[in-house]
Amino acid sequence: MTGLPTTGRATDQVAAVAHGAASIAERLAEFTAGLTRDALPEPVALRAKHLILDAVGCALAARREPFAGRIAQSVARLAGPGPRGVIGMALRLPLRDALLVNGALLHGLDYDDTHPAGVIHLTVSAFPAALGVAAERGASGAELLAAYIAGVEVGARLASVAKGGFHQVGFHPTGLVGAFAASLVAGRLMKLNAPRLAGAQGIALSFASGSLQFIEDGSWTKRLHPGWAAACGVTAAALAADDIPAPREAYEGRFGLYRSHLPPAEFAACDPSLATAGLGAVWEIENVSVKPFPACHFVHACIEAATALHRQGVDPARVRSIRALVPAGVVKSVCEPLAAKRRPKSDYDAKFSLPYAVACGLARGRFGLAELAPEAFTEPAMESLMDKVQYAVDEASTFPKHYSGEVIVTLDDGRTLGHRVAVNRGNPDRPLSNAEIEAKFFDNCALTVPESAARRIRDRVLDMESAGAAELESVLCAASESER
């Protein structure tokens, strides 16, 4: 796939706006206001619908998890009843609260798609915003789809500007950048003009958030980030619709997104030209990665490498030491502190543990939802294998374009065996096909809904343009346990 260019500097963009050029927010607003379903290439629209289908499957699989019910119940107690649906649940909530819960369901298993260059999950904020606002406004499925795609295109570019810098200082782009993308999704469906869409982004600047502190103890807050971003975006768009004055330079300003959220070195490395590069010509939705494993994307290549060694017949009992090579940009998230990563305290902790990813792939030859049960990562033999995992920086990595990984084992007789994955499976350069996404969707649905319900959902998502958004919402919310 053709990606975004890599020219431009942060200071250049600031100077240009100071001399009267359109701000980034204004240019993104113009793009969003003008995007229609008819303007979308058919392969782009079809891929977008499959990304939505993938996320919906993740949400339906998540319904059985403790976090799903507890988060939904907590939000419902605060919000009270409303008209908007929650995927796979009988619950109905006010608009913003439904977005919050739907985002948590879509993202809660960490099985949803990622835009590699931006290191961001976008469907899980853009789709809840599109679904909820489109249903609320009586919009068509075609309008929902166009708004969703606009959100992904904008969010991918805004996150790519930072070149992975947000993660290095503890910000999660899914929540942080997702709020800006969702403001445009919601504003597009509210039929805001370009000036108001620009204002929505300026308002979102005061709402956007998302901390990576959850990595320290495997807590649940990351699950809330995309839904909160969607709710922030809807709020920002509603305020912009009433012409609430907002900053013009939401991104490049003196206290804009990048300067306020990145230290000097990371800010200097930013490329603001990426925020608007190729709009309407390069479709970043085609550069979104679909996950084959329900874990942090940063460990996927090492899972695959370890699984390959398992299939070659490596006996874990004979392994003396394990060396895993990873990109420098992922160390803080999945490798450190190493002692803690060797003893995951929760399923979410396990998803962000390089030692567990490698040990699980090597010993079991797989990494699925079943491998995230507490007994799976606390098994003594697994802990012993995790203790043997060391990591080193992969100097040959092409991160963030590819999330590479290599696993090298030393056996008790001194022999070494290794396997390298330069391009992780699911990456745009090694993608999952639409048919494979459908297969993943049905596998996830099989955990909580009957096949008949799964097929109805699949058919409605892939043909969403033929009906209204409210009908799609109704089908998604009808997949309840009572259908079994």
Image (tube, helix red, strand yellow):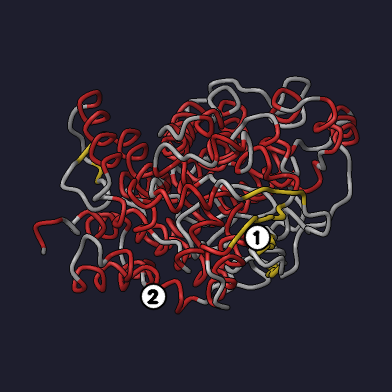
Q: Residue at x 61, y 22 (%)?
A: 246
C-alpha span from label 1 to label 2: 23 Å
Tag 2 secondary structure: helix
Judge left or right: residue 321 versus residue 88.
right
Q: Residue at x 31, y 66 (%)?
A: 467
Q: Is 434 located above or below residue 166 in the figure?
A: below
Please state which amino acid type lies under the numbered disc 1.
Answer: Glu
Tag 1 secondary structure: helix
Binning the other alpha carbons within 10 Å of mark 1 as few (below 14), some (14 to 19) or many (20 upward) gives: many
Can you say which quadrant of the picture contains the N terminus?
bottom right
Where is residue 52? Give x, y as percent. 43, 60
Total numbered labels: 2
Can you say which quadrant of the picture contains the C terminus?
bottom left
Where is residue 39? Give x, y as percent. 59, 67
Give the residue at mark 1: 284
Question: Does label 1 or label 2 sit earlier along the sequence?
Answer: 1
Please state which amino acid type lies under the numbered disc 2.
Answer: Ala
Give the residue at mark 2: 439
Residue extending farthest to the front is 413
Q: Examine the rendering and report whether any part of residue 196 can be seen.
A: no
Looking at this view, is 17 or 475 the one in front?
Answer: 475
